[in-house]
Amino acid sequence: MAQGIKAPTTEDLMSMWNASGLKQKIIFTLAMIAIWRFGVQIPLYGINADVFATQVLGNGNNLIGFLDLFTGGALGTVSILALGIGPFITSSIIVQLVSVVIPALEKLQKEEGEAGRRKLSQYTRIFTVVLAVFQSFIFMLYLHHLPGAINPGINSISFYVSSIITLTAGAVLVMWLSELITENGIGNGGSLIIFCGILSGIPIYAQRTAQIIHSNTRMQLGLMMLLAIFFLAMILIVIMQEAVRKVIIVNPKRQIGNKVYGGMNSFIPFKLNPGGVMPIIFAIAILLFPSTIIALVGNADIKSMAVKNFVMSLNHWLSPSGLTYYLIYVGLIIALTFFYASIMPNMQPKDIADNLKKYGSSIPGIKPGRPTAEALDKILTKTTFIGAMGLGVVALIPSFASYATRIETLQGIGATSLIIMVGVALDLINQVKTHLLARNYESFLKDM
């Protein structure tokens, strides 16, 4: 008789909390997030944040509002951490892409082990500083042209230099906190910071939505429909994150003495979405980097009308509410999903085929060696394509639902945010499970 899944009891939860090392990791992660949230509340000296919030966020600038969501509100308040995790994420993307093209960097990544990865991490940090300086300069240039954004009497070169240094230091601090969470805490630090930033914006979006639908019955029904679509999208995201394509493997029998070992079939699991939430985060980072600069310049006091109109047109095309944005967005998701599948060690057809041949295992009906590699390549291509297209479609559903129901106040926590939140939550659960399994295994070995 089949038994149902047993719900975790209080004793189970306490056992998880008291597991050696896990409690310390959770406390450390919460402490790092608390430091980050404290930094978000510290304003940049000499800036009138109310003017920025009124003239930029208050005018319905979807791009800046979207970027503000990913910084946990730090951009909207013009905090010392206004750049957020963006420079670090963008730098990571560029270094990973360049590593595929430049042989020396590819060698560091694949052949030199931990030492090579440390060098790549160092290059990523250095490039993060360069990007942070550039973005800080653009941001201060924009504030300079925004009437009333800079308090009177402090408009000097030393003020701009110190502000750029402060914003750059803030970006480096966020990078450092994310790396500490990755090394000593639970989960991917960068994804977790973005996750917490999105969560911090939910009350604001809920309040705006409540004000709009308060006395409108039709919009209340639309909100119920929208929330139902969001819930279904979350289910699809979970399916996308957890789905695997199992390739059956036949293992040879081995006789040692009077006993026969092996001979049982196993399988290789290929994830439908191998990159998890990273294709989404990287696609957003790639889109936001040029479009943020365009948006900031477009909102500045530009004298030339021709230049201003051109910049505003680009801003409209790359705005999160435009069709062009979503077409590029889906294209980037598909491309980055394939990119992640191509660089993951456990998804290399040739290496898998060589290992199977080495141990005498095979795929039923396929010869070992090159034919196995070609068959695996076809399977991986089809699986990744289905996963990439599914991820792209899921990314569009909540956004189109917001337009259909005309409740655009929840646009910020729509498709992208839902995928990131659910993906990071699943990753956190898997991290905890892995840690608990490791602790149980260690306890088992000690008891032997």
Image (cartoon, rainbow, N blue to C red):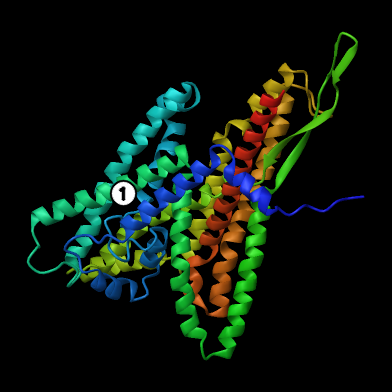
Please tell me which residue lies in front, 3 or 324. 3
Residue 262 place in picture, x, y as percent: 83, 21
Q: In the drawing, does residue 26 fall left or right of residue 442?
A: left
Q: In the drawing, does residue 223 fall left or right of residue 258?
A: left
Residue 258 visible in the displayed image: yes
Q: Residue at x 54, y 68 (%)?
A: 399
User: In the displayed structure, would residue 162 be above or below residue 321?
Assistant: above
User: In the displayed structure, would residue 18 be above or below residue 62?
Assistant: above
Please tell me which residue lies in front, 341 or 220. 220
Residue 274 visible in the displayed image: no
Q: In the drawing, does residue 167 fall left or right of residue 263?
A: left
Q: Residue at x 64, y 67 (%)?
A: 231
Residue 105 place in picture, x, y as percent: 41, 28
Q: Residue at x 36, y 37 (%)?
A: 124
Residue 208 place in picture, x, y as percent: 45, 78
SS for tag 1? helix
Please tell me which residue lies in front, 285 or 326. 285
Q: How many neighbours does mark 1 have within 10 angstroms: few (below 14), some (14-19), or many (20 or more)?
A: many
Q: Which residue is mark 1?
A: 171
Q: Amino acid at mark 1?
A: Ala
Q: In the drawing, does residue 177 fall left or right of residue 4?
A: left
Residue 310 place in picture, x, y as percent: 30, 66
For the C terminus, the quadrant is: top right
Q: Residue at x 62, y 34 (%)?
A: 439
